[in-house]
Amino acid sequence: MYSKKLIVYFSKSGNTKKLAEMIQAQVGGDLLSIDDPKPDFSAYDLVFLGTPNYSATVAPDMAAYIQSIDLTGCTVAPFCTHGMGGLQNVGEDMVKLCKGAKVFPTLPIKGVDVAEGGEKLTAWLKDNGIL
Ligand SMILES: Cc1cc2nc3c(=O)[nH]c(=O)nc-3n(C[C@H](O)[C@H](O)[C@H](O)COP(=O)(O)O)c2cc1C
């Protein structure tokens, strides 16, 4: 089990923020947006990273944030909200961005369905041994 958890998200219209809050409600941990001061990532044994799907990939603001931090040795659980396109390249691009980290499969939830996504979230948490 993971003892020290961090959730960091980028969200423009609120869907990814809402999903980040749902994750915190299920697993606990610290919740930050990419606009908050950067924490010491090595202090956490599990880092959730949340992004909207922008143009079939990780939103540029989140991609830039990930490139500015050191995730070596971290375990990363990425999550994504999206429109009609679904996950598209977000999962594989998250793996590429999180250099040196162990990266779980990205959880995709349609932005308009986030409020009803609790069960899908729980299943993903269990599949990855987080719950
Ligand atoms: C600039 C922009 C590009 C987007 N591109 C895609 C896309 O390629 N595929 C997709 O499924 N949704 C796309 N969307 C929809 C968003 O991923 C979706 O609305 C998401 O839930 C927004 O997250 P937020 O509320 O946290 O900002 C795009 C939205 C914006 C604003």
Image: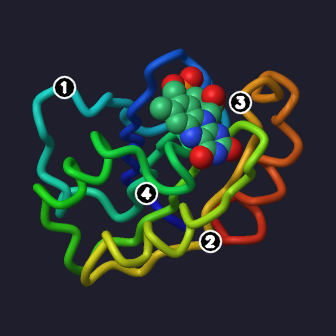
> Pointer 4 and pointer 3: residues touching (CB < 8 Å)?
no
Observer-side mark, 3 or 1, equals 3
Q: Which residue is mark 2?
A: 105
At x 88% / y 42%, what residue is drawn?
A: 119
Comes first in the chain, label 1 or label 4: 4
The quadrant in which the C terminus is found is: bottom right
* Amino acid on which the number 3 mark rests in the picture: Gly
Q: Which residue is mark 4?
A: 3
Which residue is nearer to you in this view: 16 or 93? 93
**Residue at mark 3: C-beta within 8 A of ligand 1:** yes
Observer-side mark, 4 or 3, equals 3
Q: Which residue is mark 3?
A: 111
Between the residue at mark 3 and the residue at mark 1, the CA separation in whole angstroms equals: 23 Å
SS for callout 3: helix
Q: Quadrant of residue 105?
A: bottom right
The quadrant in which the N terminus is found is: bottom right
Comes first in the chain, label 2 or label 3: 2
Judged from the image, the quadrant occupied by ligand 1 is top right
Q: Where in the figure is residue 125, as x and y percent of width and height?
A: 70, 58
Q: Which residue is mark 1?
A: 36
> Pointer 1 and pointer 4: residues touching (CB < 8 Å)?
no
Query: Quick check: 62 above or below 22?
Result: below
Q: Quadrant of residue 110?
A: top right
At x 51% / y 61%, what residue is drawn?
A: 77
Between the residue at mark 1 and the residue at mark 2, the CA separation in whole angstroms equals: 25 Å
